[in-house]
Image: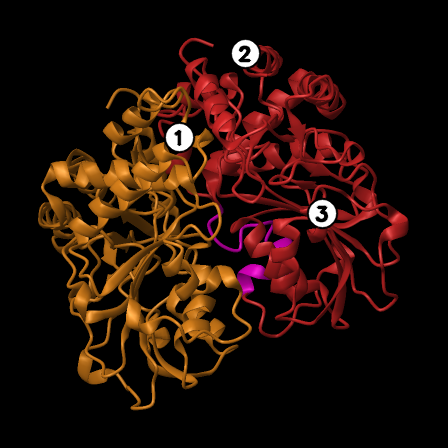
Chain colours: A red, B orange
């Protein structure tokens, strides 16, 4: 790892070192083109090749069926919060599961465009839990059911794919590429790339093509899925560098064994940390056991002062960005695909040592 | 230049080689942080420093007054086509100068949100000319007057700042940082960065703060200038890598002598090509003499076949991306800040040689 740290940031976050090395090695001259990918026209033959390969590799990894299209957009989840109702709320209402900060923001934004029914709201538990299917209140007039698969701030993750008569719309920003997904079950999946895929600035959307084409008249052209599908994401200049970096990450995931291998690693990494929490009377986990995220582990020591000391001591060992989000306080270890197992091992050892020294 | 080419692409386009080298040198470990800028949380101390420095350097280069705010957004011009009317069309109408493809697109998009008055339309001349101030039809009920300072496709450029009672709104995507600008004259300036500033995926907006806060209720939060001003562009995760690259470019512009130096180089570069056109009876310029762009020189040989031969012969010499846009046909040489004078010299020599051989 040379002088690199183990970066537990919730996003933007760690990328595979080999991916960064590859990008660095061709930053002045990509594939004999005599220029950087950053300098290429998005309509050039060289970039068209990159684009088509990235899309094909991503589709193959995610096993995207022909019924669905993959789009490369901008604006992250915040843009999707508006795009989704503008395009999909064709009869004027939708069901939203509020299980954290970002699903709440999505629901609030959707209210600008139609009637929002809250299918569940875990605010009272400070979003430490994901409700069971039986606890979801779903309407029969909904144009779609929206949920966020993994709550980065609170460290919770849906352990099942919810069932809904209306098309499923899912924010997978912080779990995408970490396990196999049955894309056919979804009307729309989206993910900002800055956690498990690429540098911030690109949003991947996987949409059932039959859902496109019903956008409201006030929908900005750049938010129209129909337009983007018809232009293969090239309505305007896309974020070419992020797309290229996504391609390098997808190649790396494939070389590592694909999404099943990513899932195994994800289980191993998160178990290392949860095992320490389960065996400890010093640390407290934020998420309830049946709702735990493999991506973001949220916990705390007995005091704010010890939390701060924990973060400081970890940083001295090259384990950085372990401070929790202000909404939960405490500590958070984000364990995305690119976090080496070694990083999780070192963190678990540090946690045990810290407990012994401070209990 | 080693094995790098001279890249005359209209955008995304050539970047300074020293900027790419610097980015490559710290791609694995920025400033001793142990991580790439691509891996940094946008709210980390390290990235906050980068962000603040980039903003300060950009403001200093552009001499942005305190009345105006600089925003770093996503979505390029296409997002601004909708954002501008959604935020600024508070009494419901605006004047648009249509001098090319992108100003036409802006006017069409604005019609979704209010009444658009066409102040001029140069379609009949295939956008080979920029109208004089006296030829502009401006209304007295307009919320703003919109124009595009440089028309990348057609190779025309406004040689003056138009005068309007309503606030001036300007798309400077393909000329920003190429000459000093009197920002105070403008209500809003925006630029996609992918021509003169950084890799695609970032839009810089300079807005008179007094114009913000009047957005329509259906405005997506991510399109609200007021929200973005209040969050210092951090409403959501910004395109961090593009912002970092913009900073490296701004440092380079400053080291080169700032915008006056950029303007001198721009005059020199474009004169090299226009001089060949003016002395030739072989080449035809697309833009009228008083409307010529220093950024994009559009011209043609006597035939499509010779145009194609020109492009092929140039590429063999490492002068690439000289094919014109399909709307004009012929040839186009884009001469942004990062194009070395040597590139323009080599192109001018090739043009003269090609003429002698094919006249």
A263 lies left or right of B341 = right
Residue B22 image offset from top left, x and y in percent: 28, 25
Q: Quadrant of the C terminus of chain A?
A: top right
**Disc 3: host chain:** A
**Disc 2: host chain:** A
Residue B171 image offset from top left, x and y in percent: 32, 63
Q: Which residue is mark 2?
A: A357
Visible residue check, residue B284: yes
Residue A310 image offset from top left, x and y in percent: 50, 22
Q: Nearer the viewer, mark 1 or mark 2?
A: 2
Q: Which residue: 15% across, 55% down? A: B63
Q: Secondary structure at mark 1?
A: helix
Label 2, residues with CA under 10 Å away: few <14, some 14-19, many ≥20: few
Label 1, residues with CA under 10 Å away: few <14, some 14-19, many ≥20: many
Please check whether the numbered discs 1 and 2 fall on a single chain: no
Mark identifier at residue B131: none
Please check whether the numbered discs 2 and 3 fall on a single chain: yes
- Above or below, A32 relative to B329: above
**Disc 1: host chain:** B
Mark identifier at residue A125: 3
Q: Which residue is mark 1?
A: B37
Stretch in magenta: A221-238
């Amino acid at each position: 790892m040379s002088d690199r740290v183990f970066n537990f940031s919730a996003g933007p976050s760690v990328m595979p070192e080999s991916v960064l090395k590859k990008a660095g090695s061709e930053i002045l001259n990509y594939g004999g083109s005599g220029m950087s990918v950053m300098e290429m026209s998005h309509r050039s033959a060289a970039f068209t090749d990159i684009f088509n390969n990235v899309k094909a590799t991503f589709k193959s990894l995610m096993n995207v069926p022909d019924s669905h299209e993959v789009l490369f957009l901008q604006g992250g989840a915040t843009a999707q919060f508006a795009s989704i109702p503008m395009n999909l709320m064709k009869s004027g209402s939708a069901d939203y599961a509020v299980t954290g900060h970002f699903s709440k923001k999505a629901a609030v934004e959707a209210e600008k465009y139609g009637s929002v029914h809250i299918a569940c709201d875990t605010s009272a538990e400070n979003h430490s839990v994901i409700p069971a299917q039986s606890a979801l209140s779903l309407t029969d007039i909904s144009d779609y059911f929206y949920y966020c698969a993994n709550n980065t701030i609170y460290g919770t993750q849906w352990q099942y794919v919810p069932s809904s008569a209306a098309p499923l719309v899912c924010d997978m920003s912080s779990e995408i590429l970490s396990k196999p997904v049955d894309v056919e079950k979804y009307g729309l999946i989206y993910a900002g790339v800055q956690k498990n895929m690429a540098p911030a600035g690109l949003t991947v959307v996987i949409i059932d093509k039959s859902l496109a084409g019903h956008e409201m008249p006030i929908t900005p052209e750049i938010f129209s899925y129909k337009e983007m599908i018809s232009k293969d994401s090239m309505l305007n200049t896309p974020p070419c560098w992020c797309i290229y970096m996504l391609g390098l990450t997808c190649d790396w995931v494939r070389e590592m064994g694909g999404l099943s291998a990513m899932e195994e690693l994800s289980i191993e990494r998160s178990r290392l940390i949860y095992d320490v929490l389960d065996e400890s009377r010093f640390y407290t986990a934020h998420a309830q056991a049946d709702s735990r995220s493999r991506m973001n582990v949220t916990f705390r020591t007995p005091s704010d002062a010890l939390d701060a000391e924990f973060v400081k001591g970890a940083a001295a060992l090259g384990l950085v960005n372990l401070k929790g989000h202000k909404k939960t306080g405490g500590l958070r270890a984000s364990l995305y695909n690119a976090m080496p197992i070694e990083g999780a091992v070192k963190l678990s050892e540090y946690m045990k040592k810290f407990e012994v020294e401070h209990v």
